[in-house]
Image (spheres, grey):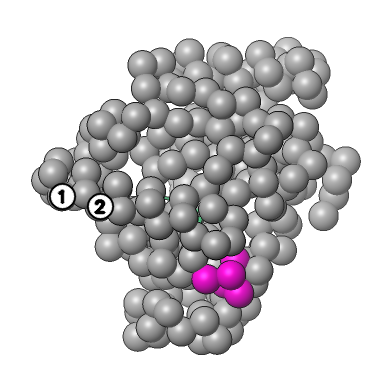
Amino acid sequence: MNQAVPVVTIDGPGGSGKGTISRLLAKKLGWHWLDSGAIYRVLALAALNENISLDDADALVSLANNLDVVFQENERGEPQVLLKAVDVTTDLRTETCGDAASQVAAIPAVRKALLARQQNFRQPPGLVADGRDMGTVVFPDAPVKIFLTACLEERVKRRHKQLKEQGFEFSIDALFHEMAARDKRDAERAVAPLQAAEDAEVLDCSYLSIDEVVDKVMTLIEKKVGGTRSKAHTEF
Ligand code: DC
């Protein structure tokens, strides 16, 4: 791991907007982006495809060690994930896959098997890492750590809108229960539970716009890492 490379970690529960915000930040800064949730999702999808039980730790670790996955951008500059050279970007976003991801992510050996894969994203000039344990476990030395949160009602609304835009129909009630259950599992698991790092800045973005949050985080990055905004402006 290249510790000289700056990392901004954005952790928080699902639907808090951390995916959108971390991607925007990475673009503004001209840095790499890690969507760690997508790594857990792709492992879960591979397990479902291969009929591997979501609690079979040995089989999941072996699958994680041999996962043939590529993270790239499509021709429109949007994130794209290939599993065994097949585009699975849309399949990864379903609630079935998210729920399966939350189950495999609760297994300590699985988290350990995926650790180096995540740390390898730390490449110059910098990395914006989105997840649940980026600031606490994966990049504990990150100079900027954000814990992004929003009330469950707002997160359900946002996720519902997002799913609708992606063509998935899901009742608000079902989504509310599903997200509440996922929050509970992610927060209560024994390893790397969802919690803010001690040195993280906690931002409640229930009633903040995306631009307001991005601006707040950019100001923090400038303070802690320095000189990024002018650089970002020359790159974009
Ligand atoms: O952020 P997401 O919804 O794509 O994440 C899917 C699941 O993966 C989530 O329920 C918890 C798990 N996850 C995790 O345990 N640690 C991470 N760093 C990222 C995601």
For label 1, the SS is helix
**Residue flagged by tag 2: what amino acid is it?**
Glu
* In the image, residue 7 above or below residue 21: below
* In the image, residue 117 above or below residue 153: below
Q: Are marks 1 and 2 in contact (CB under 8 Å)?
A: yes
Badge number at residue 178: 2
**Residue flagged by tag 1: what amino acid is it?**
Ala
- Residue 144's spot in the image, x, y percent? 71, 30
- Residue 204's spot in the image, x, y percent? 46, 23
- Residue 5's spot in the image, x, y percent? 82, 40
Residue at position x 40%, y 77% from top? 54
For label 2, the SS is helix
Q: Which residues are magenta?
A: 107-111
| Residue 68 vs residue 208, the one in the foreground | 208
- Residue 123's spot in the image, x, y percent? 77, 47
Looking at the rendering, which quadrant does residue 201 occupy?
Answer: top right
Badge number at residue 63: none
Q: Is residue 120 left or right of residue 84?
A: right
Residue at position x 77%, y 32% from top? 143
Judge: label 1 CB < 8 Å from ligand 1.
no
Mark 1 lies on residue: 174
* In the image, residue 58 above or below residue 13: below
Q: Is residue 77 left or right of residue 196?
A: left
Tell me if mark 1 has few (under 14), some (14-19) or many (20+) residues whose alpha carbon lies within 10 angstroms of its own: few
Looking at the rendering, which quadrant does residue 6 occupy?
Answer: top right
In this rendering, the count of numbered labels is: 2
Residue at position x 58%, y 61% from top? 191
* In the image, residue 96 above or below residue 59: above
Which quadrant holds the N terminus?
bottom right
